[in-house]
Image (cartoon, helix red, strand yellow):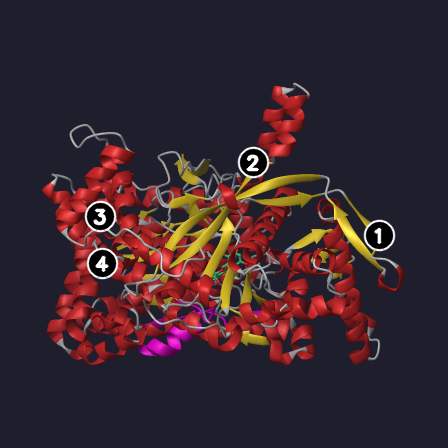
Amino acid sequence: MTEPTPLIATPEHTVEGFVREYLRELNFAQGTILERASVNDHYLALARTVRHYLMARWITTTTEHYRRQPKAVAYLSAEYLLGRQLDNALVAADLEDIAAEALASLGIDLADLREAEVEPGLGNGGLGRLAACFIDSLATMSVPAIGYGIRYEYGIFRQTFVDGRQVEKPDEWLVGGAPWEFAHPEHEVTVGFGGHTERYVDGEGDDAVERTRWVPGWKVLGVPYNYMVPGYRNGRVNTLRLWSSRATHAFDLKIFNHGDYAEAVRSRTFAENISKVLYPEDSTPQGKELRLQQQYFFVACSLRDFINQLLPEDFDLHDLPERICFQLNDTHPVIAVPELMRILVDEEGFDWDEAWEVTRRCFAYTCHTLLPEALEVWPVDVLGRLLPRHLEIIYRINDEFLARVREHSGDDELLVRRMSIIAEHPARSVRMAHLATVAATKVNGVAELHSQLLRDKVLADFARFWPEKFTNVTNGVTPRRFVRLANPGLSGLITEAIGEGWVTDLDRLRDLEPLADDAEFRRRFREVKDANKHRLVDLLARRDGIEIDPGTMLDVMVKRLHEYKRQTLKILHVITLYDRIVSGEVAVEDLVPRTVVFGAKAAPGYVMAKEIIALINHVGAVVGAHPEVSKVLRVAFPANYNVTVAETLVPAADLSEQISLAGKEASGTGNMKFALNGALTIGTDDGANVEIRQLVGDDHFFLFGLTEPEAAAMQEAGYRPSSYYEKNRSLRRALDLVAHGEFSGGNRSTFEPVVSNLLGEDRFMVLADFQSYLDAQERVEAAYRDPDAWSRSAVLNVARSGFFSSDRSMRDYMDRIWHAEVLPPL
Ligand code: H53
């Protein structure tokens, strides 16, 4: 890593060069020949071949980072929802055409090999996908950055449906081979857990100081696996380093020496459990001890790795804030704060104040939620047992912080209790969001409204105490994966119109605006949408045996199943349409034919979410089986929605459903992907919807529902959902159909929990927003009847959504938080 100009072999950037490299891989790495290779052999050979083309850039980038020691960013995230790697790498290396031609010359179809890749699903939803978009943008913008995370052996579960109910299957993504990763066991890190702390006297005479050391009770190894993060045609490849847990060699040896082979193997399993499986809860943490082990495991590995591998040996850690910003992606990595304190104080001999000064300048914290149940807390008995030294450090951080609060507030003990890092009720626990906020240089929300609500509500005391700490960075998505790759038709059309600069400068989409008034452009735009719908038809037929009609309006709601996102509101709309046709209230000729597509995984232990999935599937079955209704209305719910499905679904959509209760969705990023691909949004004033609407304009967005202050006021005044049931005939009929067993073969108990929850509590105010949603859907229908006006709006959505590039998000993080260096392209 130290030699400045490494000698690297790079294969020739030609069809012949590619063929040579490919055959070499097939023969020497896979040990097979063209005639006998399986699809998986071909896929692995192809992946490795593409890798070769990126290798020189990767080594050069890494070497340069080490040599220049620039101010850099380390993104700490427990999740990276990467999606398939092959296409992204091909595009980044400008190899699409060469690879396709080379393979064709060997009688192989590139499209078949794409299908062989199992996507790394190392994340649950928005937060994990955001991390993946961010590292893509950082690489493309030549920012010296490294992503740190966990190499889960099993990613997010594979969802299947049995009788319409979700059944989870393990995600065995590593089984076919993992051609994109590079294991580096020689850079393993040892991580301690448990045990106790002890005081001792360091030095003698006048120099003697009392210190603390942690004596862990058990240890595991972290082995890094490196992934390339190629920038888009800028010659740079950054690194994503994911940690896998292993048993320590010493532990093994000890037990083997006792001759207990079985016990030795069991201990191995115990250590390896840490990185075994991704917890499948999105925004509802379960507080399991193994999860805390995962969190500490990966941040301890990452900090140690950064210090040992990426800094020069003689680096003075007092200067750490000049060299790095550790970005905490939600509270999952927050235990890194006491870990850095421990390293500086216990291992490096810093005094406490010095260490705190360094630590608080090294971290920044992104909060991604407003839901109280999503804010992690760890009971002190769990944390203290697993990480006794860290708990001591947290207590001291808290003592010093609360002393300052008292000083400023004149001993307002209620305020002190509210702000404390330690909660006393219901059990004594550590509030990770408070720890993060106290430690961080900056705290950011992920959309304007969200950041405002963080300041005004969730972290209001802190925002008064440190107003300058709080900032906003609105989320974004990578235009490489979600436009350039996912929507080749639209990409071609855009490039033809405005040149190809938009791929790395998405604001240029503005230049499309005049074309919204160009009838020929709109026609071609519709042609692209149509072709995308046909691609979706093929995918759903092949993958799920689902038949959909590409001639219908494609109305799409894809996201995790959560009550606050309100999939129930969408299904109540479907039920209302069904009811109106069945009861003869409307004739099928008077409706715009629609296909409503759902995609959603529920956390396995989230009972209500699973009931809602079953309800959607059952409604879909009844709607699809009805001879009249099915002429104009279909529900498609492909199982196991993931990044790969999104890449075909998003470009095909006409209507994007973003219907969370205002004040609950921090940002959303699906909303951005749809707008960028020319779908119109029906949505509430929530999260980044607000900014989407402001940018695309009210005439091109279907707004409905309560605003956040209205919803809050209504809750305050005592919300009574049943009053809407009593007042609103459509709503009453829809809920009665469910309650009376219309969608459960006459069985009234099947969906009783869903109905009684809506009528009784309805925490997310589905019933209050129901009529407003129906009205907005009527406006959608009217608009869709005019294809020219609709596509004009769709083009304007594309033209005005450039702001939602994750490149812009990265620029904002750079300017407002990181102040890292930008290197020139290579
Ligand atoms: O993070 C997304 C947001 C979205 C928010 C989501 C999220 C998770 O996926 C998991 C935990 C959490 O606290 C938040 O729900 O609104 O767009 C990225 O910021």
- For image coordinates 37% across by 56% down, the residue present is 59
Cβ atoms under marks 1 and 2 closer than 8 Å: no
The image quarter in which residue 718 lies: bottom right
Residue bearing the label numbered 3: 537
Q: Which label is found at residue 217?
A: none
Residue bearing the label numbered 2: 272
- The quarter of the image holding the N terminus is bottom left
Say whether disc 4 or disc 1 marks the residue closer to the N-terminus. 4
The image quarter in which residue 29 lies: top left
Kind of residue at badge 2: Glu
> Which SS class for mark 3?
helix
Q: Position of residue 193 (x, y in %)?
A: 69, 43
Query: Is residue 632 depicted above or below 272 in this figure?
Result: below
Residue bearing the label numbered 4: 94
Say whether disc 4 or disc 2 marks the residue closer to the N-terminus. 4
- For image coordinates 32% across by 67% down, the residue present is 826
Residue 627 visible somewhere in the drawing: no
Kind of residue at badge 3: Val
Mark 3 C-beta closer than 8 Å to ligand 1? no
Kind of residue at badge 1: Tyr
Kind of residue at badge 4: Asp
Using the numbered discs, state the Cα–Cα distance from disc 4 to disc 1 in whole angstroms.
Answer: 59 Å
Using the numbered discs, state the Cα–Cα distance from disc 1 to disc 2 in whole angstroms.
Answer: 33 Å
Q: Nearer the viewer, residue 472 or 207?
A: 207
Using the numbered discs, state the Cα–Cα distance from disc 4 to disc 2 in whole angstroms.
Answer: 38 Å
Say whether disc 3 or disc 1 marks the residue closer to the N-terminus. 1
Q: Which label is found at residue 200?
A: 1
Range of the magenta residues? 683-712
Q: Residues within 10 Å of mark 2 (few under 14, many from 20)?
A: some
Q: Nearer the viewer, residue 363 or 443?
A: 363
Cβ atoms under marks 4 and 1 closer than 8 Å: no
Q: In the displayed image of the protein, which residue is found farthest to the right?
A: 205
